[in-house]
Amino acid sequence: MKSQPDLAEHVSIQKVHPSLEQAVCFAGEQIAIAVEQEIELR
């Protein structure tokens, strides 16, 4: 994302689990922040 920040709006992570009522979505900017702060997205 650092080399091509304009692509951040095209990236997301979807967490789908039977115990969740709906999927959890992490957008590109949220993923970048998590990576910078060494936070593991689960």
Image (cartoon, grey):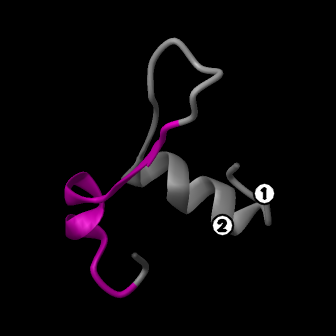
Whole-percent x, y for residue 40 in the image: 76, 59
Q: Is 17 drawn above or below residue 7 in the view shown?
A: above
Q: In this view, does 39 lie to the left or right of 4?
A: right
Q: In this view, does 9 lie to the left or right of 15?
A: left
Task: Choose between 9 and 12: the one closer to the eye.
Answer: 12
Secondary structure beneath label 1: loop
Q: In this view, does 4 lie to the left or right of 42?
A: left
Considering every residue shown, the one lying at the far front of the view is 18
The segment highlighted magenta reads 3-16
Considering every residue shown, the one lying at the far bottom of the view is 3
Residue 15 covered by magenta stretch? yes
Residue at 52% x, 12% y is 21
Question: Is the Cβ of the residue at disc 2 closer than 8 Å to that at disc 1?
Answer: yes
Query: Residue type at mark 2?
Result: Val
Can you identify the residue that label 1 sits on?
A: 39
Can you identify the residue that label 2 sits on?
A: 35
Q: Is 2 drawn above or below residue 6 in the view shown?
A: below
Q: Is 41 drawn above or below residue 26 in the view shown?
A: below
Secondary structure beneath label 2: helix
Residue at 44% x, 28% y is 23
Residue at 61% x, 55% y is 33
Task: Choose between 19 and 5: the one closer to the eye.
Answer: 19
Considering every residue shown, the one lying at the far top of the view is 21
Label 2: how many Cα within 10 Å (few below 14, some 14–19, many 20+): few
Query: Residue type at mark 1?
Result: Ile
Residue 19 covered by magenta stretch? no
Residue at 69% x, 67% y is 36
Whole-percent x, y for residue 11 in the image: 29, 59
